[in-house]
Amino acid sequence: MSNNTRITQRDLRHVWHPCTQMKDHEQLPLIPIRRGAGVWLEDYDGNRYIDAVSSWWVNLFGHANPRINAALRDQLEQLEHVILAGFTHEPVVRLSERLVKITPEGLDHCFYADNGSSAVEVALKMSFHYWRNVGNRKKTRFVCLSNSYHGETLGALAVGDVALYKETYEPLLLQAITVPGPDCYHREPGQSCAEHARVMFEHMERTLAEQGEEICAVIVEPLVQCAGTMRMYDPEYLRLLRAACDSYGVHLIADEIAVGFGRTGTLFACEQADISPDFMCLSKGLTGGYLPLSVTLTTGKVYEAFYDEYTNLTAFLHSHSYTGNPLACTAANATLDIFEQDNVIENNRRLAQVMKEATAHLNDHPHVAEVRQTGMILAVELVKDKATREPFPWQERRGLRIYQHALANQALLRPLGHVSYLMPPYVIDEEQIHHLAKVMHEGIDLACVD
Ligand code: PMP
């Protein structure tokens, strides 16, 4: 029996894996990873895989990064964790100072949690609670975009629109208002993404005009709807949305959990629209992909609405045990050090260009409807019929064939339905990108034969 099999047999007796139909593992081998280095993951039988999906979009500077490792080792000798209510520590103070400096203007206060969904819950609760604290009890609703995804906890799920994750739980969820979004895949032939964004914004404008008085906030994933199969849209939509939220007195929540920290080509996606949201949620790349941590940043105006005598009961009493964990904050500070010391965003521009060139030929593939890219995120949409864009039936799970082919060829390319994508750590090199593109192309060929 191989070393891999020995571990996976033990695993399958007791571990229930995320986002998985466990019965699949009767056919599909689970891969136990012994170690990582840079873009590489290595299993217990010595097989290696390039982590093209950054381990669910978290890893920025490679596995076992020496600089982050060193910072964590130091911190481990000092303090592993302390309650953040009534107490504080230098890593969280330093991280907050730095986040305020690098995020869009006006985001001055940092509220921590330990995963992305919780950061979204914090933003939703804080927005609702703000309106109550300022005496407005009419605002109880949230607006989200079609095809959006903001996490799996009940509040975050309620403001999402990916049926696969949401439908089953619908009876449990608060009723969000879902507005048709600016997804550029659906533009008319000859239309630019900016024009499409302007046309689609009319739905949002109408919703805010008609229901603004009962709406707390609009929540969006700026520029790329990642879990919604990497659908992309023009920054024009965010500019229009910021202006409309201001004129109708509604908060704007930017969920940059997936797109933050350079994924879209700028440090934060909001920069490309030159806007500041009222709340910004960050997680994933925040710690370079090392430890669970999230933060919801907000403005002085929101913070002030909670700041009062205790007995007035206006405080935000939300908490998680591991809020602002010092080890996680240290990993985050070490990650920001790398952004400061290396020319990350500029280097990424070159890598993004390589990704584009390496996959350009896929545009001509008879089953590829679109190759789209925003910065370091590149996605390839497979369809049954290129002319009509009729998708393959989802039951055929053709993306899975790409995944299996990739695993046999040193690559972790986990697709989203019939969309195969690259979202690699920023330490990837040109040769590795070309290898991924080749494996992806072969995988797509295999996935599309009947
Ligand atoms: N928002 C977005 C945009 C995400 O992509 C995700 C995770 N994929 C989340 C929220 C939820 O984060 P977590 O998985 O850490 O709860």
Image (cartoon, grey):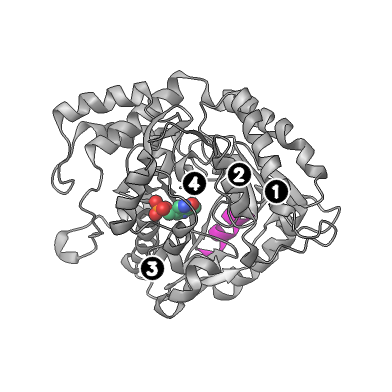
Dot 1 or dot 3, earlier in sequence: 3
For marks 1 and 3, give the CA distance.
38 Å
Amino acid carrying label 2: it is: His
Kindly identify which residue carries mark 2.
405
Kindly identify which residue carries mark 4.
258
For marks 1 and 2, give the CA distance.
8 Å
Q: Which residues are magenta?
A: 238-249
Amino acid carrying label 3: it is: Leu
Foreground residue, 118 or 52?
A: 52
Above or below: residue 51 compared with residue 122? above
Q: Residue at x 66, y 29 (%)?
A: 434
Question: Residue 78: percent from the left, percent from the top?
Answer: 14, 28
Amino acid carrying label 1: it is: Leu
- Foreground disc of the pair 4, 1: 1
User: Can residue 254 be seen in this snapshot?
Assistant: no
CB at disc 2 and ligand 1 closer than 8 Å: no
Magenta region, main secondary structure:
helix
Kindly identify which residue carries mark 1.
446
